[in-house]
Image (cartoon, rainbow, N blue to C red):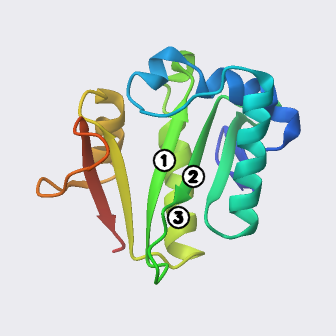
Amino acid sequence: MKLETERLVLKEIHEGHIEDILRIRSNEIINQYVKRNYPKTNYDALEFILHIKRKTQNKEIVFWGISYKDTPNLIGTICLWKFSEDRETAEVGYELLPEYHRKGLMSEALNAVLNYGYNELQLLEVLAITSRFNENSKQLLLKYHFTLEEDQKDEDNPDNIIFSLKRD
């Protein structure tokens, strides 16, 4: 499942992306906003890739690596996951290496994924959970007219806030 934007290709990740996934998911700046076990070795990154491939085959997640059109290396990832039982709601998750921030790249990727989610998967709502300290992420969500759900809490992380976007 490949998506293209003006500058980017969103593509399936595979075993050839081990070093990219290790670099992205172990990045200290990204991880200051995300509570997760991050990969410490190439083997850990490979385990993550194989986990994502299984979840993709089981239709539990739609996951893309993000790269510039003219380069094979990944600079980030974006996914739709945590689908509701009726498959009408999903959560979007994304991460981008810091050297690519503030260039409009995640905006391009998010736009493509929202279009895919609403038009191809027929989602009615997309949720986004982000750290209340992650100003770039909050600005991105507000740009796409996500609404802050002030009454909802992330039970796993009190620093997170929840946004939602309903299909027009």
Q: Earlier in the sequence, mark 1 or mark 3?
A: 1
> Looking at the rendering, in which quadrant would you find the C terminus?
bottom left
In the rendered view, does 132 fall on the left or right side of 120? Answer: left
Residue that label 1 marks = 93
> Looking at the rendering, in which quadrant would you find the N terminus?
bottom right
Tell me if label 2 and label 1 are in contact, CB under 8 Å. yes
- The quarter holding residue 156 reads top left
Whether residue 73 is visible? no
Q: Position of residue 27 (x, y in %)?
A: 56, 19
Residue placed farthest to the bottom in the image? 86
Q: Position of residue 33 (x, y in %)?
A: 38, 28
Q: Residue at x 18, y 57 (%)?
A: 152
Q: Residue at x 55, y 15 (%)?
A: 99
Q: Earlier in the sequence, mark 2 or mark 1?
A: 2
Q: Residue at x 40, y 21 (%)?
A: 32
Residue that label 2 marks = 79
Number of other residues with Cα within 10 Å of mark 3, as a class: few under 14, some 14 to 19, many 20 or more: some
